[in-house]
Image (cartoon, helix red, strand yellow):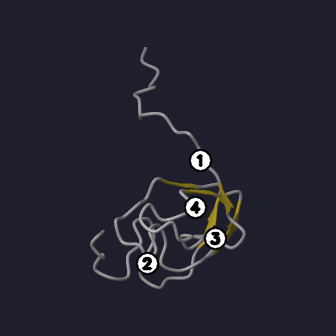
Amino acid sequence: MPTRGSGHFGAALAGGVVWTISNSIFANNTSRDSWSPMTCTTTGSGSGDLQWPQNHVVGNQADSACVSGIRFADAQLSALQDNAVRR
């Protein structure tokens, strides 16, 4: 049986602040807590955003949306790379 987390959690945004976010990706913020928000503790406003995963990794409940009407989709990001142009 999974252990419960410590309560209210949001790996990306937390603290009860109202925000507007546009054209952003919230990717792979997960926890072993089946009840607390994984990514954001409150829902802000914005457009053109992606969030993944949609459901908790433990218990499969839906995660809280970071932005009203956010699209839940896997952005399929690869590992970070150094793409600087050097001359």
Instruction: Give me the C-alpha separation between circle 1 and circle 3.
Output: 16 Å
Residue 40 pos. (x, y %): 49, 72
Give the distance between the C-alpha atoms of the residues marked 1 and 4, in whole angstroms: 9 Å
Task: Check disc 2 and report the residue beneath it.
Answer: 35
Question: Decide: marks 4, 2 in contact (CB < 8 A)?
Answer: no
Name the amino acid type tagged 1. Answer: Asp
Picture coordinates of residue 48 (x, y %)?
71, 57
Viewer-proximal residue among 2 and 36:
2
Dot 3: few (<14), some (14–19), or many (≥20) neighbours within 10 Å?
Answer: many
The mark nearer the N terminus, 4 or 2, is: 2
Q: In this view, does 64 lie above or below 80?
A: below
Secondary structure beneath dot 4 equals: loop
- Per the image, the residue denoted by label 4 is 54
| Residue type indicated by callout 4 | Gln
Q: Nearer the viewer, mark 1 or mark 2?
A: 2
Residue at (30% x, 75% y) in the render: 5
| Placement of the C terminus among the 4 image quadrants | top left
For residue 67, the mark is 3
Q: In this view, does 21 lie above or below 25?
A: below
Which element type, helix, strand or loop, lies under badge 1? loop
Residue 6: name its quadrant.
Answer: bottom left
Amino acid found under the numbered disc labelled 3: Val
52 vs 49, left or right, is left
SS for callout 3 = loop
